[in-house]
Image (tube, grey):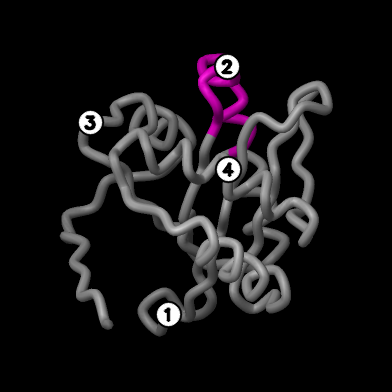
Amino acid sequence: MIQFKPLVVTDIDTIVTMMKAFYAIDNYPIDKEKSKTLFQEFISNEDLGKSWLILSDEETVGYVILTFVFSFEYQGKIAFLDELYLNEKARGKGIGSQAVTFVLEQSKKLSLQLIYLEIENHNQNAQKLYIANGFELHNRKLMTHKLK
């Protein structure tokens, strides 16, 4: 049975440990202490978004983070599906699809207008998962400018 448990302060070490494993897939840097501090802020301010641990038969197997943005183009609050991670043991069992369905249901309850996300070009499994759940590729390019 799959469950989604809202993240609480006592879960921060668990989620940051999984986050480290997720980031290692693509060799992204992570500062565990900074991430813990960010989760303290994130959990304490519901305007920033929502996060959940994903449990399978009461064992934590992943997490999902939804962050909020206000958009005039989309006429209100939208969300960025910032991260969806499943450990290797949980992959290929339909849990990812259940997680996307859960996020979509929660997004409707939160009156969100749109969900957007990004995936790595090499991650064809993620792309298939999202397309199968109604996400569409769009013709815009995502650009970033890191502020120091």
Discs 4/2, front: 4
C-alpha distance separating marks 3 and 4: 23 Å
Discs 3/4, front: 4
Q: Which mark is residue 122?
A: 3
Name which residue lies at 74% across and 32% down.
55
Q: Residues within 10 Å of mark 3 (few under 14, many from 20)?
A: few
C-alpha distance separating marks 4 and 2: 16 Å
Name which residue lies at 67% across and 50% down.
13
C-alpha distance separating marks 1 and 3: 29 Å
Labels 2 & 1 near each other (Cβ < 8 A)? no
Instruction: Judge from the rendering whether residue 148 lies leftward or rightward of residue 74; answer left or right.
Output: left
Q: Is residue 94 above or below residue 40?
A: above
Discs 2/3, front: 2
Q: Quadrant of the N terminus?
A: top right
Name which residue lies at 46% across and 61% down.
80
Q: Quadrant of the C terminus?
A: bottom left
Q: Which mark is residue 146?
A: none
Q: Residues within 10 Å of mark 2 (few under 14, many from 20)?
A: few
Closer-to-camera residue (17/96): 17
Q: Is residue 6 magenta?
A: no
Q: Residue 26: which quarter of the image? A: top left
Discs 2/1, front: 2
Amino acid of disc 4: Thr
Disc 1 target residue: 71
Q: Residue 31: which quarter of the image? A: bottom left
Q: Label 1's element?
A: strand
Discs 4/1, front: 4
Disc 4 target residue: 17
C-alpha distance separating marks 2 and 3: 20 Å
